[in-house]
Every structure is written in structure tokens, then in C-alpha cells.
């Protein structure tokens, strides 16, 4: 199915998943899609491997966690997700050195928590891992403890060529 891009989300300075200045990080970019889907695009490298040519399961978990947890930003930019519980199914090995995608969305929102689900797929849209998760809703100000994070480290970076849509598994 083809999903239209609504907007691109910000990156941070040092986050492991989306940090632009984190040398060991994944430098992931996030796009809000129609139907309240959040898409992450990234490429794993040798530094992120477990067995040869396979991405470490902890990296896969971090990507799924970040993508599903960030989906709440589509409803409220000041509310962030803090992980309470995750259940991941690893279906196939995740390759390195190719563009991969994670898709996440919210399935249930309550006053203090939300739930979501997502998947990671390869460049051929084959699903390699799935996840369901629960998060506490927390204001960004309480997470960053008074630092000027949003003003100084929550960065919008324009793409050289902005994608208009993505084809993804249903």
C-alpha cells in the first residue's frame, strides 16, 4: 500500500536512534504518514551487528521502541512516550548495509498511557520483526529536566529531496 508523507519529524542531537551527532547512532529519520502511521528510515552498519551481516536484536528493539513511542507526537508535540512494556517477535534476520523501514502507530490512548504496534521491514517490504508496546505519557519538559532541549537540541533537518510517499506492507 502507498502512504503519503504528511510531514517530517525532528531529530535530536545525541539520541542513539535519531541523533545527528551520535557517531555510534543510527541517524534515523522519521516521517508522519497518512492514516496516523509513523515511518522510520535507517541503515545499519557493521558497528550495529551481532552475528556477521545481521543487525543486533537490541538495535532492532531500539528502533521499534523509538518509532512506536514517537507516534504520540502526531497527536501532541509536547507529550512523549516513556516505555513501560514491549513484546518483540523476531521473524527473520535483519540485514546490514541496506535501507530498512520501521512503521509504528498508536492502537489505544488512555489518560496516562498509550499502546502501539509496529514492524520492521527490509527494502523489499518483507516484515522481519513485529512489536507491541505500552508507554507512559510524559511531557517533554519533565523528561529533559529543565534543559533547553526543544530549543537547542530538537532539530528539523530538511531532506535534500523530500519523499512524497512510501510503499509499505499493509
Image (spheres, grey):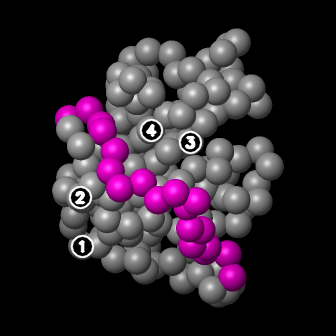
- Which residues are the magenta region? 152-170
Do the numbered discs 1 and 3 sit on residues whose CB atoms are within 8 Å?
Answer: no
Do the numbered discs 4 and 2 sit on residues whose CB atoms are within 8 Å?
Answer: no
Q: Which residue is mark 3?
A: 42
Q: Are there few (<14), some (14-19), or many (20+) residues within 10 Å of tag 1? A: few
Residue 144 image label: none
Disc with the residue nearer the chain's start (4 vs 2): 2
Do the numbered discs 3 and 2 sit on residues whose CB atoms are within 8 Å?
Answer: no
Q: Residue at x 38, y 67 (%)?
A: 7
Report which quarter residue 128 is drawn in.
top left
SS class of the residue under badge 2?
A: helix
Q: Which residue is mark 2?
A: 34
Q: Position of residue 87 (x, y in %)?
A: 37, 35
Disc with the residue nearer the chain's start (1 vs 3): 3
Q: Which residue is mark 4?
A: 101
Mark 1 and mark 4: span between their CA atoms? 30 Å
Disc with the residue nearer the chain's start (1 vs 4): 4
Q: Is residue 17 visible?
A: yes
SS class of the residue under badge 4?
A: strand
Disc with the residue nearer the chain's start (4 vs 3): 3
In the picture, which quadrant includes the C terminus? top left
Q: Are there few (<14), some (14-19), or many (20+) residues within 10 Å of tag 2? A: some
Amino acid at each position: 500500500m502507498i502512504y503519503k508523507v504528511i510531514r517530517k519529524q525532528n531529530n535530536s542531537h545525541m539520541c542513539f536512534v535519531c541523533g545527528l551527532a551520535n557517531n555510534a547512532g543510527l541517524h534515523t529519520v522519521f516521517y508522519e504518514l497518512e492514516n496516523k502511521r509513523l515511518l522510520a528510515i535507517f541503515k545499519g552498519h557493521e558497528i550495529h551487528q551481532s552475528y556477521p551481516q545481521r543487525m543486533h536484536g537490541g538495535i532492532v528493539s531500539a528502533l521499534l521502541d523509538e518509532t512506536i513511542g514517537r507516534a504520540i507526537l502526531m497527536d501532541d508535540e509536547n507529550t512523549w512516550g516513556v516505555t513501560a512494556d514491549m513484546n518483540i517477535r523476531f521473524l527473520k534476520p535483519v540485514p546490514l548495509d541496506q535501507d530498512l523501514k520501521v512503521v509504528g502507530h498508536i492502537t489505544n490512548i488512555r489518560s496516562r498511557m498509550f499502546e502501539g504496534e509496529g514492524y520492521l521491514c527490509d527494502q523489499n517490504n518483507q516484515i522481519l520483526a513485529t512489536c507491541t508496546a505500552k508507554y507512559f505519557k510524559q511531557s517533554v519538559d519533565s523528561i529533559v529536566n529543565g534543559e533547553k532541549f526543544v530549543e537547542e537540541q530538537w532539530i528539523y533537518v530538511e531532506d535534500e529531496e523530500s519523499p512524497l510517499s512510501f510503499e509499505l506492507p499493509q
